[in-house]
Amino acid sequence: MSSLPVRSNACPRPIAVALTFVIALPACFAAPNEEPDTPPLLRRPPEPFVGPIDDKPDPPIKDMADQQISEYIREVFQDRDGVYWFGTNGDGLARYDGESLKYISVKDGLAGSAIRGILQAPDGAMWFATEGGVSRYAEGKFTNHTIANGLSDNEVWCIFRDRAGIIWAGTHEGVCRFDGKTWTPFPLPRIDVTEPESRFTPKVVFCIFQDRSGNLWFGTDGEGVHRYDGKSFTSYTTKEGLAGNLVRSIAGDRLGRIWIGTEGGGVSCFNGRTFRNFTSKDGLNNDRIFEILEDRSGNMWFSTLGAGACRYDGKTFRAFAEDPNLIINGRPARSHVQEFFEDRDGVLWLGCSGGLFRLDGERIINVTREGPWPSSPKKPAANANPLEHFAQMILGEWRLGLINDAIQSDTWGWGPGRRSLVARTVNSRGDGETTSGVCRVLYWHPGRKKIAMLALLWQGMIGEGTATIKGDNARFDYILHYPTHPSRKLILDWKFDGPNKYRSTLLEIVGEDDPFELASWDYVRTDAPTPPAANAKATPPSTTQHVTALKPLVGHTWAATGIPMNGRRVDIQSHVDWIPHVEAIHARIVEPTQGGEPEHLFDTYVYHHTGTNSLHCLALSNLGAVYEGDVNVLDDGALQLELTGYEDDAVIRRLVRFDFEKDGSLRHRAWSVSREGRTLLFDVYHRIA
C-alpha cells in the first residue's frame, strides 16, 4: 500500500478505506376509549415522579382536559424533517412543525380517527394504521388502503416496515403484507393454549418486530408470539416460559435480547434460549405492559395500563407514577401510558390517557396545545452524553464492498460507562483472511468541550480530530499523521439514508482552498453476531519497532488490590492485548463484581504517535474523565507516564510509573503533581492473574 500524499480526484483505496470513520447519529394498543381495570396495590408504592413522598399531597389543580392535544395520545413520531406527528384515539392526527399545531382528520382524507401506528418510508411518504384501514400521505394527499385493496380487515392495530422494504400490517383478522401494489394475507400458525384469553380474538396481531438476525416477530391477542425466520415459524406461549399469552409489545435491546410485554403477566426478556420474566414483585408498576422502548442510554422503559411508566437500568426499576395534582377528565394523568418515543435530540415522549407528556431531566411534564415544546435545537442537560447520538452504530455490522471481493466491516462497541465508543475495522480478502485493521475511538473531551477522535491505522498512520453533529449526519475534521510524509488536513462527511445506510465522503483541505472531494463510499448495516469481548486475544502486529518496551505487559491479565479510586479502594483486573494489525496496545481495566459482569472502569491506549515521534497514552474512565500524555522508557526499563487529566472542568497533573520486578510482578506508583511538588497517591503491585 502506498502512503504517499496525493492530490487528485480519487484517493488511493487503502488510504481512503482506512480513513472512513463510520458514525451514525444516529403498537400494541388498548381498545378505543376503553379504560383498563385499576391494578391491584403494589407490594410497595411506586416512587412519586414529582416531589417527595407526602401523606397529604397538595390539592389537585383544575381539570386540564380542554388544554390537551387530545384525551388519548396513542402514537408519537418525528419525521426526517423534524416534524412531530401525534396519533390520537379519536381526534385523528396532530402535526407540529416547530411553529404551529395542526389537526388532520377523516374530513381531510384520513382513513380513520384512531391512529395506532406511524412510519415513514424512504420516499418520504407517511403511513398510518387506523381503525378504518391504512393511510399513505404524500405530497399533501392521502391514499387509503382497505379490504378492497387486499387487507384482511379495516381494523388495523399496527404497521411495520422491514429491512427489505416490505410494509406489514397487523389487523383484526391477522397479518397482511404490501408488495407495493396490493395487500396479501400472511397466515400465522394457530396455537392451542391451556387457558385461552383474548381481548378480542387470537387472530388480532397487536405488534410486529424484526430482530438483528432478520427474524420477524408477531405478537397476538392470546396465542403468544410467533417468530418467522423466512421459512418457518417458532411459537412461544406460557408453555415455553413466556410471561403471558396476550402480547401487546415487542422490542429489542442493544445486546440482541427480545423484550415482550404482556397484558397481565408482566414482561419477558428472551436471550435466544430462555425467558426471564419480570412482574410487579420485581418492581414493575403493574403487570399490564403496553409499550416497551430502549433509550439511547440503554435503559428499558415499560408503559403500564393503570400505573404509569417504569424505567429499568439493568439492575433496578424506577416507577414514574401518576401525578395527583394534574387532573384530566376527573382522574390523575399518566396512569395509562400507551406510547414511548425518543426523538432525534434524545427527548423521551409519552403518549398517555391524559394527553401528551415528555421527559425533562428527571421530571415528566405535560405538553398541551400551548407547549412547552422542546427548544430547537435542544439544549443538552448538564450531564448529557453527546455520544448517545451514535448509539445506533452499536447494532449490527457496517460493511463496504471493495474490489476483488474484499470486504471491509466495522463493528462498534461502548467504552467504559458508555462515555466513549470503539470501532474495530477489519479488511479481509474474498477468502475471508484478514489483511488489515483499524481502531477508532470517539470520546467527549471535557477540556476541549468537543467530541474527539483517535484513529490508529496500519503502517503507523494516526488520525486525530473532532466531530460536529448535524442532525442525523456528522462531520469529522482531522489531521492524518504519516510516519515519513507531511500531515494532511481531511474531512469526512456522513449522510444517512435511514437507519441502515449512509454515504461517507472524503475531502481534503490544502492551503486556503475549499475542500475538494477525494472519494465516497456507501455503507450498509448487516446483522452480525455480537462482537467479541474487548479482551479477546489479538494477533500482534507484524513489527513492534516503537513499542518493544510494552511487550512484557501484553497477553496477560494483571490483578491488583486496594487501589484508591473515586473515594474508595477497589480491586481491579487489567486485560492487556495488542490492537490487531496496529502497533499499539489496549488495556481494559475492570472491577470484578459478585456474580455479575465486571464493572468497566477504564480503557487505556498506548501507541506511537507519528506526529510527535513519541509513545503516547490515552486513558478514558467510566465517569467521562480523559487522561493523556507521553510514555517514557527509562534506562532501567521502567515506564513513566506524564499525564494531564481532564475531570469535568478540573485539569490535573499525574506522574505514573511502572517497574518490572524480578518476581514477575509489576509495581505501580502514581503521584499528584502541582507547583509545590508531587504527592504519592498509591504504591501497589500487579500480579498476573
Image (spheres, rainbow, N blue to C red):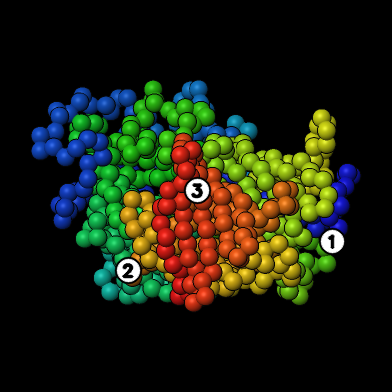
Give me the C-alpha separation between circle 3 and circle 2.
Answer: 31 Å
Q: Which mark is residue 594?
A: 2
Q: Which residue is mark 1?
A: 1
Q: Which residue is mark 3?
A: 654
SS type, badge 2: loop
Of residues 133 and 613, the one drawn nearer to the viewer in this rendering = 613
Label total for image: 3
**Lower sequence index among marks 1 and 2:** 1
Give me the C-alpha separation between circle 3 and circle 1.
Answer: 39 Å
Position of the N terminus by quadrant: bottom right
SS type, badge 1: loop
* Residue 22, horizontal then vertical, whole percent: 66, 51
Q: Is residue 603 visible?
A: no
| Amino acid tagged 3 | Arg
**Lower sequence index among marks 3 and 1:** 1
Looking at the image, is mark 3 or mark 2 nearer the viewer? 3
> Is residue 304 placed above or below 314 in the rendered structure?
above
**Lower sequence index among marks 3 and 2:** 2
Taking the spot 53% from the left edge, 33% from the top edge, the residue there is: 83
* Residue 209, horizontal then vertical, whole percent: 48, 58
